[in-house]
Image (tube, helix red, strand yellow):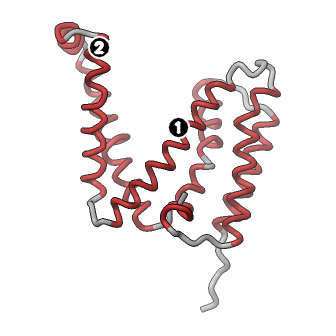
Amino acid sequence: GGVIFLKEKISKREKIGATIAFLGTTLTVIEPIFGNNNGTFLSGNIFLVGYLVVDVASAIFLKKLLRDKIAPFALTNLSFVIGFLTLLPVLFNYFSVSEIANTLGNTKPIYHLGVLYMAIFSGTIAYTLRAKGEKTIEVGEAGLFGYLTPIFSAILALVFLSEQITPLFMIGGLIVFVGVTLAEYKKPRNT
């Protein structure tokens, strides 16, 4: 996307590394077909691929806005406001104003603090840092780190959810890691 829409340049090493990482990611996405669950979780993986496609479009749009000198903090908060306003009609389609007010009023304060925490730390701060990061490097280079998401997610799922990691997933994860490492490897400069 960065090459096509933003005219970014990528090296041959980055192309090879990204291709290898893509193949590893593909292996992890289709892994449920070969697992014990008869592919029942494949639909979830397909939704995640859809998310990644939308995320790429978002990263390209973000980079264009950042090139126009719009502040990362402002972009982050504007996107949250737009998301909120977009979801309001859906909310009101399912719930009345009194139901919403009643639910909010009867919710324990600790849950409101949880939402506040998510809004500040995993929302505003995280997305502002992402935007600042994408402002300083190419979209393609930032995207390479997205290939690592399944690896970190699997480790966290293993620790917190006791999910199983299959040998095929580990092979795919290793291929992803090799691809990202190859793409990001920079020869040391002689000083």
In the picture shown, does residue 150 fall above or below 129? above
Q: Is residue 142 left or right of residue 120?
A: right
Question: Seen from this angle, which residue lies furthest front?
Answer: 4
Give the amino acid type for the residue marked by disc 2 in the picture.
Answer: Asn
Disc 1 + disc 2, Cβ < 8 Å: no
- Locate residue 55, reporting x and y percent: 49, 45
Secondary element type, mark 2? helix
* Residue sitting nearer the eye, 163 or 169: 169
- Locate residue 23, reporting x and y percent: 75, 49
Marks 1 and 2, the one that precedes in the sequence: 1
* Residue sitting nearer the eye, 67 or 134: 67
Question: Seen from this angle, which residue lies furthest bottom?
Answer: 191
* Residue sitting nearer the eye, 33 or 107: 33
In the picture shown, does residue 171 fall above or below 85? below
Tell me what residue is drawn at x 27 percent, y 61 percent.
70
The quadrant in which the C terminus is found is bottom right
Give the residue pinned by disc 1.
51
In the picture shown, does residue 42 fall above or below 120? above
Q: Quadrant of residue 145?
A: bottom right
- Locate residue 113, reporting x and y percent: 26, 27
What numbered label is drawn on residue 110?
none
Tell me what residue is drawn at x 71 percent, y 19 percent.
40
Q: Is residue 32 left or right of residue 101?
A: right
Classed neighbour count for the residue bearing mark 1: other residues with Cα under 10 Å, few (<14), some (14–19), many (≥20): few
Give the amino acid type for the residue marked by disc 1 in the picture.
Answer: Tyr
Give the residue pinned by disc 2.
93
Q: Quadrant of residue 173?
A: top right
Secondary element type, mark 1? helix
Classed neighbour count for the residue bearing mark 2: other residues with Cα under 10 Å, few (<14), some (14–19), many (≥20): few
The quadrant in which the N terminus is found is bottom right
Report how far apart the C-alphas of labels 1 and 2 lie in the structure.
24 Å
Tell me what residue is drawn at x 43 percent, y 60 percent.
134
